[in-house]
Image: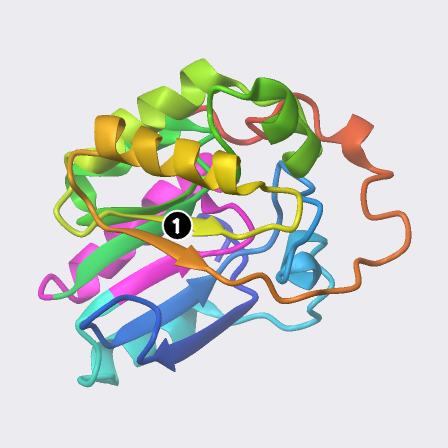
Amino acid sequence: MSDLPRIASMLTSFIEHPGRISLGIYLPGCNWRCLYCHNYELVLDVVGEEVCEDELRWELENNRLIDLVVISGGEPTIHGEKLLNLVKLVRDLRPDLKIRIDTNGSNPGVLSRIKNLIDGVALDIKAPPDDVEKYSMIIGARFDRGRFMKSVAIARDLPLTIYRTVRYPCLSEEDLDRIRRFVEENCGGKPHYFTEFNPVRMPRGWRRDLSKLGDSRGAHSVL
């Protein structure tokens, strides 16, 4: 499975995408350290599980309930070429399925390479994108608005794209209104969902390894 990213877990979901039954494929690792991360075990790659290639192939070939594959994380785009290989494998085994990639928008180069093989993106908007300081504070890395805007432009041209925002406690009503206006002006009329914040206790030293991450794209993001 060396040509594919490590898959930490996989499950069938009725709630991952509106109106779809999806197979979620979860990849470990992320180039950000958000203040509140419900998938921090995936981000730190301490889940302790792994889905082998044979299991993945069996699930794709035999699960006839699903009509969508969602590749999530973590941040899938940090896996670069291996993510591309995974998308191609899904396409080869089940050309009838739609494919969606979940992303923080930090790696437009990766999205550009795979955009013709996927049907949509779930792009998270963490804060008003024109407030670089607040965005950077939330994600624990320097926010690159230029790269993010390139990802927004790629995502809005795909039919199954959605945008998501968590109502973090540090976001004011003014911040939320600015995010709404941003979506109206930049996201091509695609759906935008606000989700309620559920408190989560982050592990000790959650942001201590930020210096090892390099820039916000991640070490393996460039294809």
Q: Position of residue 35 (x, y in %)?
A: 71, 46
Among the 4 quarters of the image, the one containing residue 64: bottom left
SS for callout 1: strand
Say which residue label 1 marks: 164
* Side of 40 relative to 174 (left or right): right
Using residue 89 as the reference point, say whether residue 128 is left or right of it. right
Label 1 crowd (10 A; few <14 / some 14-19 / many >=20): some
The answer to which image quadrant residue 113 occupies is: top left
Magenta stretch: give its range: 69-96
In this view, 29 is above or below 220: below
Q: Position of residue 92 (x, y in %)?
A: 18, 58
Q: Is residue 140 visible?
A: yes
Q: Position of residue 87 (x, y in %)?
A: 29, 51
- Residue at the spot x=44%, y=56% of the render? 72
> Extreme top residue here?
146
Residue 72 drawn in magenta: yes
Q: Nearer the viewer, residue 76 or 105?
A: 105
Is residue 219 visible in the rendered image? The answer is: no
- Secondary structure mostly seen in magenta is helix
At 62% from the left and 48% from the top, the residue drawn is 29
**The C terminus sits in image quarter:** top left
Residue 163 position in % (x across, y down):
33, 46
Measuring 62% from the left and 61% from the top, which residue is drawn there? 39
